[in-house]
Amino acid sequence: MPEMTYREALRAGMAEEMERDEKVLLMGEDIGVYGGTHLITDGFLDRFGKKRVIDTPIAEGGFTGAAIGMAMLGLKPVVEMMTWNFSFLAADQIIQNAAKVRYFSGGQVEVPLVIRGPNGGGVQLSAQHTHSLENMYGHFPGLKVVSPVTPNDAKGMMLTAIRDPNPVIFLEAGALYGTKGEVPDGDNAVEFGKARVAREGTDVTLISYGRQVNLCVRVAEKLEEEDGVSAEVIDLRSLRPFDSETIVESVKKTHRAVAVQEQWRWFGVASEVASIIQEQAFDYLDAPVIRVSGAEVPAPYARNLELAAFPSEEAVAQAARQVLYQEVSA
Amino acid sequence: MVFCGLYKASFKGKGATVPAESENTADGAVETQEQQQGGGGSVATDGDRLVELYKKMVLIRTFEEATQRGFRQGKIGGYLHVYIGQEAVATGFLDAYKEGDRVITAYRDHPHVLLLGSDPKAVMAELYGKGTGIVKGKGGSMHLFDVEKGFMGGYGIVGGHIPLGVGFAYAQRYEETDHITQLYLGDGSISNGAFHEAVNLSGLWGKDGMNPCLFIVENNQYGMGTSVERTTAMTDLAAKFDAYGVENEKVDGMDIEAVLEVAHRAADRVRETGKPYAVEALTYRTAPHGAADFFEKYRTKDEIKQWRERDPIGQLEQKLIEREVVDEDGIEEIKNEMKETIQEVVRFADESDEPPLEELYTDVYTGGGVYTGEEG
């Protein structure tokens, strides 16, 4: 199977849909002439022309709102948020218009819109440029929220996102743009609302999404090696719609769960995971569900502080050992 | 920008500027006739046409008065923003509407949807929160929609709808049509960031002929209770568009003939060029801001009275009588006819059923299976 980077996979997904459907167009800051801050759209301007690859001024609310309007008339805009941190400036448009206009119009309009860009931290961008916004956008009915971590899912979920007639918040693992993975040729569309079992196991379930999935896989390998523990890793991939079933089935098998997220603990996705497990698999649990989250501080700059602010292999391994009632170092 | 010289006098009310009696009717009419040659006669002077417009304005006002009663009776909930005093603006501009065009506005949206030909019964039923409402009882007064008729909605966040309209206009040219977007906004939205970002984009895209957007500023002098002069040091709202390369002018929004002339000229121009254009219509909301605006501490009775003297319906009535198009009995007849129509409209709304509870979870998403809210 051919290998490509996460970046190339995103690019392939968008380019293939643009070739297939003339209603698909791209908008964002520096996506055209510059080629995209993260070079996701490099070459698109030459290939598709300025009518379909629109360089915008730095006005997230304005261009996101315009994209919503285009979508309401049947175009399929894919908007690049240079980083999701800038989406606060467009939050009124995303939340008040994109998410709700279908409902308050009594179903008279659709908003086939994708907003994509890098989410989360890990590259020393400090406080204002480091956020994980899946819980914020996942809060609002009317939006779909996805967070692929493999190149295969990056492409496959991009195809699905563009074809979806609803607004999709597409949270990319920005720190992983250069990572490689296998992506089959052709249409590999990945259905939303289906979690992926990233690694099978029997003793404990590690539930995550985005780049923390890779961390969990590394921890699972370590647990196997050091403790002889078999950990299952679930990649949620899609946060709205949410796949409760895969988690619950896994916990019924392992009886123990750790939910890992980069974002802050309070009011986050991991809390939702823990709640679903206690509601739907309470009798199967042998230990309370533990959440591993980012530190409750704005993201710091210094490398050592940043590393301390995000979930670490040690923290996840420790949480796994805790739910397994193994000895935990202090 | 073009300044017509209509607004010579201003008086010191609590901040609002009252336009002087319009003196340009004759000039405007001549201009109009010249421009309309070959286009099917004068827009301004045709008597039958003015009667039709008069009927529309009376219908809107009668409708709005009925909504005020409905609100006081507790039949209408939420917010209620009426268009009383401003009728000439939407009536004049929507006269230039052509099939395929799109119209979007904020939350003072009842007249726009009515003028586009939506069923007043469905509009009133929406306000009454009924299943027969134009958006099935899901939006209420601030969120009227009739996409088939070109009406892309009423929106409740000041300024928030402006970028959408600019997006419509881009899509209209992307699809290579000659349709345009009429984008209505209030004076209150001019200080909002969304306005500036959206108008900037419109001007920019218009350079490539990709933004046939007609901005219509309904300057009714107040954003809720704050006068224009208390919101910006530069109160020429049309001139704000200059900053973004969007040509613009002002019009006396109390004079239907003046509005008509500008509306057709501006709409034609936008349609031909694919470039945006802005018109600031100076008007006045003689009714309170919302149904809960009881005290009106922000303006004087005298100010309201002065504007009432320039009431768009009153002015047109006078013209129709002076020009012997309709006599006073005829005027009375029209008013009674509209009253009866609206009585029937109210009866329909009152007697309609509330939306079925199954509607709670519909229209959240589209495509896929049935949404229950349990999927996350």
Image (spheres, coloured by chain):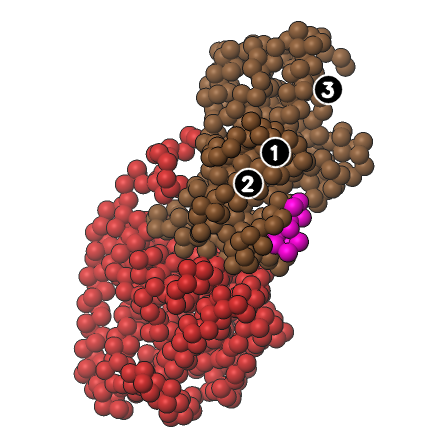
Chain colours: A brown, B red
Query: Is residue A38 a member of the stretch shown in magenta?
Result: yes
Residue at image location 69% in from the left, 40% down from the top: A130
- Choose the circle earlier in sequence order: 1 or 3: 1
Separation of residues labelled 1 and 2 (CA atoms): 10 Å
| In the image, residue B290 above or below residue A189 | below
Identified by mark 1, the residue type is Met
Residue B90, x across and y down, in percent: 37, 71
**Disc 1 from disc 3: Cα separation:** 30 Å
Q: Are marks 1 and 2 in contact (CB under 8 Å)?
A: yes
Percent coordinates x, y for residue B214 in the rendering: 45, 70
**Magenta stretch bounds:** A29-39
Q: Is residue B208 left or right of residue B38?
A: right
Q: Which type of secondary structure does the marked residue at label 3 adopt?
A: helix
Q: Chain of mark 3?
A: A
The residue carrying mark 3 is: A314
What number is the disc on residue A12?
2
In primary-sequence order, the first of circles 1 and 2 is 1
Q: Are marks 2 and 3 in contact (CB under 8 Å)?
A: no
Q: Write down the chain letter for disc 1.
A: A
Does dot 2 land on a helix, a strand or a loop?
helix
The first of marks 2 and 3 along the sequence is 2
Q: Chain of mark 2?
A: A
